[in-house]
Image: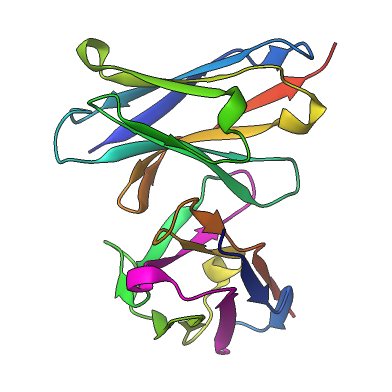
């Protein structure tokens, strides 16, 4: 059974870079033609799609975040990653990695707090 | 960007009752690529419905989706205690993919 697990920095200082990785287990990130997304949810708020990436490295980002987002894929380690630069308190959220089919498999989520 | 507006914001019902949730799009959803998710406190969302009316794997048949174009509905035929949660609609027909703001189904 496919499982996703987020990891990374839980506390980031304002203006710094948020970095998260999603480890995929129970299946290959390269199989099935799927793309892989990051989605976030600020405390008490709704869901915001950040962007997606294919195993080939082709990516698409939400225009609202595009200037600050970079996604990458590491096929050898079956994982993909998110970097978000110049963070502010508004980027405080639970970050989920998800398989797009549409969003049928979710990680448990990881809380990232932006604070000095 | 397609804006999805869900109504009502909160639905207060009793177990066994029928729940009807609405999702209206600011423009037509291409391919009717509209999905519904359920989220309980402290948990990741769970896919219920995709392509407007297809149930995801393992989803009970009391959940059904309908609609096309700009108007979509999620119906829970008879609420079970575990169904009280927040429900989100989401479109993936046009980038950027967007979510509605959610409908909370609470126990009356």
The picture places residue B54, in percent across and down from the top left corner, at 29, 73
Q: Nearer the viewer, residue B52 or A104?
A: B52
Asked where in the image residue A91 lies, by quadrant, the reply is top right
Which residue is found at the position 43% from the left and 59% from the top?
Answer: B94
The picture places residue A84, in percent across and down from the top left corner, at 60, 21
The picture places residue B37, in percent across and down from the top left corner, at 48, 61
Position of A26 relative to B34 (above/below): above
Position of B104 relative to A96 (above/below): below
> Looking at the image, which residue sits at the far left?
A31
Left or right, residue A28 beside residue B106: left
* A22 in magenta: no
Asked where in the image residue A41 lies, by quadrant, the reply is top right
Which residue is found at the position 72% from the left and 49% from the top?
Answer: A45
**Does any portion of residue A108 appear in the rendered image?**
no
Q: Nearer the viewer, residue A36 or B95?
A: B95
Image quadrant occupied by the N terminus of chain B: bottom right
Position of A35 relative to A75 (above/below): below
* Span highlighted in magenta in the image: B17-42
> What sort of colour scheme is used for the picture?
rainbow
Which residue is found at the position 58% from the left and 80% from the top?
Answer: B21
Image quadrant occupied by the C terminus of chain B: bottom right
Which residue is found at the position 48% from the left and 53% from the top?
Answer: B97
**Does any portion of residue B95 appear in the rendered image?**
yes
Total number of numbered labels? 0
Q: Nearer the viewer, residue A91 or B103?
A: A91
Asked where in the image residue B68 lies, by quadrant, the reply is bottom left
> Looking at the image, which residue sits at the far right?
A116
Left or right, residue A103 beside residue B70: left
* B33 in magenta: yes
């Amino acid at each position: 059974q496919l499982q996703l697990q987020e990891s990374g920095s839980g506390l980031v200082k304002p203006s710094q870079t948020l970095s998260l990785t999603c480890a995929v287990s129970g299946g290959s990130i390269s199989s099935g033609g799927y793309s892989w997304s990051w989605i976030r949810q600020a405390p008490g708020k709704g869901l915001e799609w950040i962007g997606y990436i294919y195993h080939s490295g082709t990516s698409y980002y939400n225009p609202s975040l595009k200037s600050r987002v970079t996604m990458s894929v590491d096929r050898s380690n079956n994982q993909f990653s998110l970097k978000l630069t110049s963070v502010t308190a508004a980027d405080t959220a639970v970050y989920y990695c998800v398989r797009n089919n549409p969003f049928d498999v979710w990680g448990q989520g990881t809380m990232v707090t932006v604070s000095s | 960007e397609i804006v999805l507006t869900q109504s009502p914001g909160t639905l207060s019902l009793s177990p066994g009752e029928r729940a009807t949730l609405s999702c209206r799009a600011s423009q037509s959803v291409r391919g009717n690529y509209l999905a519904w998710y359920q989220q309980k406190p402290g948990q990741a969302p769970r896919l219920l419905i995709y392509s407007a009316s297809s149930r995801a794997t393992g989803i009970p048949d009391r959940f059904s989706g309908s609609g096309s174009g700009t108007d979509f509905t999620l119906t829970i035929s008879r609420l079970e205690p575990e169904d009280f949660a927040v429900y989100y609609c989401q479109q993936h027909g046009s980038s950027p993919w967007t979510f509605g703001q959610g409908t909370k189904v609470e126990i009356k």
